[in-house]
Each structure stands twice: as structure tokens, then as C-alpha cells.
Image (tube, helix red, strand yellow):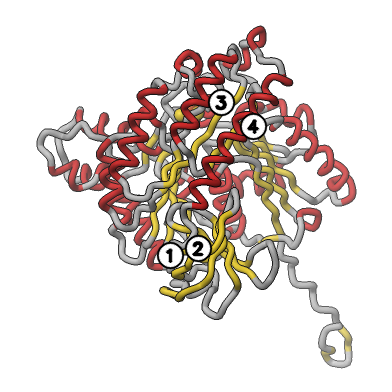
Amino acid sequence: MGPSLFGVTSTSPEPPRTRTYAVRTYGCQMNEHDSERIAGLLEADGLVAAASESEADVIVLNTCCIRENADNKLYGALGHLKALKAERPDVQVAVGGCLAQKDRDLIQQRAAHVDVVFGTHNVQRAAELLAEARQHGPVIEILEETARDDAEAFPSALPARRDADHSAWVTIQVGCDNSCAFCIVPAVRGPEISRPFGELVAEVEGLAADGVTEVTLLGQNVNSYGRDLTTRLRTIDAGPADAYEAGADWAADDRRRLRPLFADLLTAVGDVGGIRRVRYTSPHPKDLRPETVAAMAQSPAVCEHLHLPLQSGSDRVLGAMHRGYTAERYLERLAAARAGIDDLAVSTDIIVGFPGETEDDFERTLEVVAEAEYDSAYAFVFSPRPGTEAAERQDEFVDHAVCVERFERLQAVLRRSSRRRHEARVGRIEEVLVEGPAKRGPDQVTGRTRQNKPVHLPAAEGLRTGAYAEVRITAAGGHYLFGELLEVTAAPAHRRRIPVASA
Ligand code: SF4
């Protein structure tokens, strides 16, 4: 009831209700990072995060076609949302990401209640497209490629709604120039485009000023970062913009070095004041150069962890996958990395049952895995991704029961090496970055060592999210370590939650 005026009771208008959103993410870190940006764009547009998806006014499904059964999962989710939309017709449903890029019009043909479909090259348009759909009805906007000159086409150049205040992802490139037979990324994300060197360093400086202490550089093939920039710059006369595009070291060299820029970028980002940890994912074994190993060894901030996807230990299968290395070459590069970087932890990805994989091929994989002594691994049974070369090789698909049996044998070898490597850390003193309360119970916190190993330890004063601590490792499990606090060495640097940040 509003105030009365001259004895007349009037009713004040209800304040407009703040609209809410939810973003559901399927897939890899690149997609999670895109989702942070979608959330940031929606918040910049005045929306706030909904308490639950069923209460949201805008629901965005950020899809990934790398994962198994991606389309079944998407269309299943859209089926549930149809019922929600029947109850609350004002709810807007948007589908973005790789599967949207690939399926395009098909999504609305199969789910007419979808308001917006957008792809991987126009994430920056999410809020505008939703506004357009509210006014004029459903919108499908899929672009064929990322515009090199459009800074906003890179997810890191957009507003962000980060989940953690102390840690941030930084996209250094989009797309991929490789053609792995099992992978849909080149088709849906396009060719590699690197962000200018100066822009990346400035972004990390901005994050550090906000109290971020850990950054993870993201790309489909991070260690070929800059190849497109330097190729382009070599064909033109040197100019002042080159240092911004490709870094001062590269631009200062008259011969315009052939070396890739990723090593320079690691060093420059590691030198930013306040940044204590630099990680990156994913590198390609064929592009792991000595300069990168040297930069990892020499930059104190770059963590001693390398994710080096093997995929298969059989040269025949690696050739069929178009991976560009042999098992021997892979092991040589791994040995060089281990020789160059003290106390390096290594993780990998392995596909079991790639089309045409024989028992002999698989045994080669077991041999390489045993020799590589991984700290951890993501092993998958091959499943065809529509639109890829491997999906066409149906006559060579390996029987599912055989795949499962091979997968179990592989897991046994992987478990042995990861347990050995975890047990070797018992008794050591490790620096742990606290990530938050442990799922195991409120009396524990979880953190991560520089080698990317999760550590559970009893909660204690000062062990707040974002703090650094010296921890003695007391026991080891297959996937994690246990520890006891010796000393909190640094309090969290972030001063406040950062709901929206612009590059
Ligand atoms: S390197 Fe291969 S697996 Fe990685 S994104 Fe490119 S095509 Fe896909």
C-alpha cells in the first residue's frame, strides 16, 4: 500500500523485478570459460544469477560436441525445458557453443521452444540476441569464423562472472590448425587465431591488480600460440605495433625469429607482479619446443605440471589420428621436459579403441604408458563424434566389449603409476593454494600443489580460499594427497568478489 495523498489512497507501482539467469555448461575448460563470459554479459545487461535453473528467466545451455552423447544430452535437457516453458512462457532458452555451431537450424527444428541459437564465433552477442528474441521472436545466428580484428570475439575480452576470485582463465587463442581425426574442434572453432601479446599481458596485469594470483592460459593448442601473428608480421615492415602484437623480444629481433611465442608469453605472464602461479592447457606434443621447457624451468611462477596428450602409443594409430608424432618422438619430448624441469608432474589423455586399433596397437599404448609414468590421466573409450573423419570409419569400429576390457587394463597401469607418484610425495613439504571447503566435510579444506595435485587437510584459521600454505604431505590416495598445515604463507590477495571484469 502506498502513501495517501489528500486523503486519497494511491498504490505505488511495483518496482520492476530483476530478471535472473542460469548458464548450464557442457564440456571442456574452454566452454566453462565461455560460460563465465556469457554470465558476465548477462550481468552487464542487468540480470542476476538465479537461485536455481527452474527459477531463472533466461536459461543458456552452453554445449560441447567433444563429449560423448552430446546431442542426446542437449535434446534431453531441451525436452525438460519445454515443460518449464509451458508453465512459464516468458522464460527464454538459448543454446550456444560447439553443438549449436554444428547443428545450427536443426536445434530449432527439433526444439521449437528455443529462443536463441548462437555459435562459437559470436559468444559476445549472447545478451543482444536474447534482447532481439524478446522483441521479435526466435533468432538463429551462427557465424562462419571469428573476426581477427574483433577483440570481443575472444572470450577473455568480455565481461566475466568468475567462479573463483583468486584464480582466472585467460584465453590466448581460439581455434585449431590441426586435423586430428577424432576431433570436431577445427570444424566448430575454426583456424587458430592468437590474441595480441600486449593485450594478454595487460589482461593478466589487470587480474593481478584485482588480487588474482593464479592464471591458466587457455587454448586448443597453446604452444603454437603466436604462429599466426608472427607469420603475418614477417610479411610486413617492422612497425611500432609489432611489440604489442608479438612481444618486445620478438619485435626487437631484426631477423624476426622463427621460434614460437608461447615461451615468451609464459615468461612475461610469470613476471607480472602478484601472479604466483601460471598454468596452461592444452599443449600439443608435436609443438612442445625446448624454449617452452626452458621458460617453464626458469620462470618461478610457472607450475611444474605438464598436460601432454598421448592419445595412443601405436605409431600406426597415431598416424591414422593425424597426430603428427610417433611414440618415440613423444617419449623423447617427455624425457626432455622431465630433464629440464625439476619435479615435473605429467598428465595425459588416451583414447582406447580408436577405429582399427588392434590388440598389438593397444599393447604399444600400454608400453608407452608404463614408460611415461603419468601422475594422472584422462582415458576414454572411443566414441564417434558426428562430422569427424573417425566417425566415418564405421567398418573399423572396435567391438565395445573389447574396448571395455582394454580400458580396464589401461586403468590398472595408470592407477599403479599415479599411486607410486603420489606415495613418493609423502613426507614432503608442499606449497598449497587453498581452493575452498572440502566435499569430504566442513572440517577439511581442499587445495592444490604446484604439481596440480589435490590435497585435503584439516581446516584451520587462515586457511581461507585463495590463501597459500606450507603443508606436510602425510598420506596419499590414488587421486589426491592428505596433508597437515605447517604455516599459512600468504593470505588471499583478492579484496572482494569481482562480479564483472572487463579486459
Ligand atoms: S590439436 Fe587435435 S585434438 Fe586438439 S583441438 Fe586441435 S584437432 Fe582437436
Left or right of 391, for residue 370: left
Q: Position of residue 166 (x, y in %)?
A: 48, 64
Assign a secondary structure to mark 3: loop
Ligand 1 within 8 angstroms of badge 3 C-beta:
yes
Q: Which numbered tag is attached to residue 473? A: 2
Mark 3 highlights which residue? 184
Q: Which is more N-terminal, label 2 or label 1?
A: 1
Q: CA distance from mark 3 to mark 1?
A: 42 Å
The mark lying in front, picked from 3 and 1, is 1
Q: Outermost residue, bottom direction? A: 7
Asked whether the beta carbons under mark 3 and mark 2 sit within 8 Å of each other, the answer is no
> Disc 4 designates what residue?
99
Q: Which residue is mark 1?
A: 429
Q: Is residue 161 visible in the rendered structure shown here?
A: no
Of the residues under marks 4 and 2, which one precedes in the sequence?
A: 4
User: Could you tell me if the residues under marks 3 and 1 are in contact, i.e. CB atoms within 8 Å?
Assistant: no
Q: How many residues crowd mark 3 within 10 Å: few (<14), some (14–19), many (20+)?
A: many
Q: Nearer the viewer, mark 3 or mark 2?
A: 2
